[in-house]
Amino acid sequence: MSGHSKWATIKRKKGAADAKRGQLFTKLTREITVAAKEGGGDTETNFRLRLAVQKARAENMPLDNVQRAIQRGSGTGEGGANYEEIIYEGYGPNGVAMMVQTLTDNRNRTVAEVRSAFTKAGGSLGENGSVGWMFEPKGMVLIESKDGQDPDEITLAAIDAGAEDVSANTDEDGETQVEVITGFEDLKRVEEALAGGGYFVSNAESTMMPTALMTLDDKGMEQTLRLIERLEELDDVQAVYTNLDLSQAEELMESMS
């Protein structure tokens, strides 16, 4: 799995999202508001908004909250800040490359908070382009295998729809999740083909995937995971991408908790 999706899956298993649901709703609200402002309030014609609403509903965000965010973004509701999308690049401890996606109404505050997080972790905030060349924009679709659906069947359907890579992961409860990686420009087409084929799409989003993964020992990985957590706790941060290989992170996360 890609670093971001693996990290998100680990946190969901541990209930970290539930523990900070208010902050999570704030981030989701910002994304919905910006998406509605950018492309209008109709989820049928605004793909970014549809994905943001889908993610919000998957996290059990109240429908009233979703509607208010759409109305603020589309100009039919009250209030609402003008958010700016900024991606910060830097190196974490041990030279791990990191990209930090933010939505902010105060870039001075945001850059100060992001820089502080890097510095305290022994890393450094870099210039634009310092690590971006190590990542490629991609689309990611997550499908839950429901009602006995065969993961191999889902995989074939995804490939037929134009997926670049597909992997199936079964957890200790026997639940299977299929991760589909697409070209950035193919995300909408692949997501719609799979949803239209009767498969349960639990999440679909644009992401940044590293072109090569970096491995560290447990100490180095723990330092990096704590930096990722610290960054994700910032209200302005929407996502953190890294080239660290997180495939062995689950056991370490248990010991960290």
Image: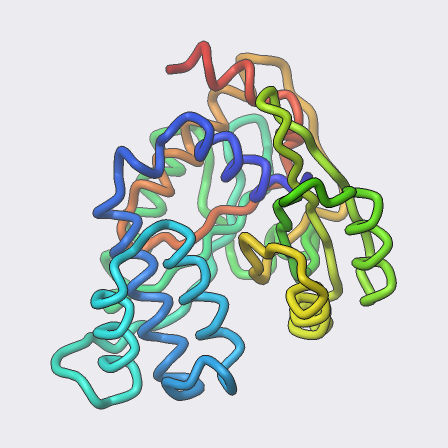
Q: Residue 170: x percent and y percent? A: 68, 29
* Residue 145 in view here: yes
Q: Residue 254: x percent and y percent? A: 46, 14
Q: Which of these two is toward me, 7 or 46?
A: 46
Q: Is residue 164 left or right of residue 203?
A: right
* Residue 184 in view here: no
Q: Is residue 70 left or right of residue 220?
A: left
Q: Residue 232: x percent and y percent? A: 37, 42
The residue lying at 66 percent from left, 27 percent from top is 247
Q: Residue 174: x percent and y percent? A: 64, 26
Quadrant of res 14: top left
Q: In the image as oriented, which residue stretches furthest toward the left?
A: 78
- Marks counted in the figure total 0
- When the figure is inspected, residue 114 is found, relative to residue 88, above or below; the finding is above
Q: Is residue 226 left or right of residue 135?
A: left
Coloration of the structure image? rainbow
Instruction: Pick the quarter of the image with the N terminus.
Output: top right
Quadrant of res 212: top right
The residue lying at 41 percent from left, 84 percent from top is 38
The residue lying at 66 percent from left, 57 percent from top is 199
Instruction: Pick the quarter of the image with the C terminus.
Output: top left
- When the figure is inspected, residue 23 is found, relative to residue 20, above or below; the finding is below
Q: Is residue 111 left or right of residue 188?
A: left
Q: In the image as oriented, which residue stretches furthest toward the front?
A: 147
- When the figure is inspected, residue 64 is found, relative to residue 247, above or below; the finding is below
Quadrant of res 56: bottom left
The residue lying at 66 percent from left, 71 percent from top is 192
- When the figure is inspected, residue 44 is found, relative to residue 184, above or below; the finding is below
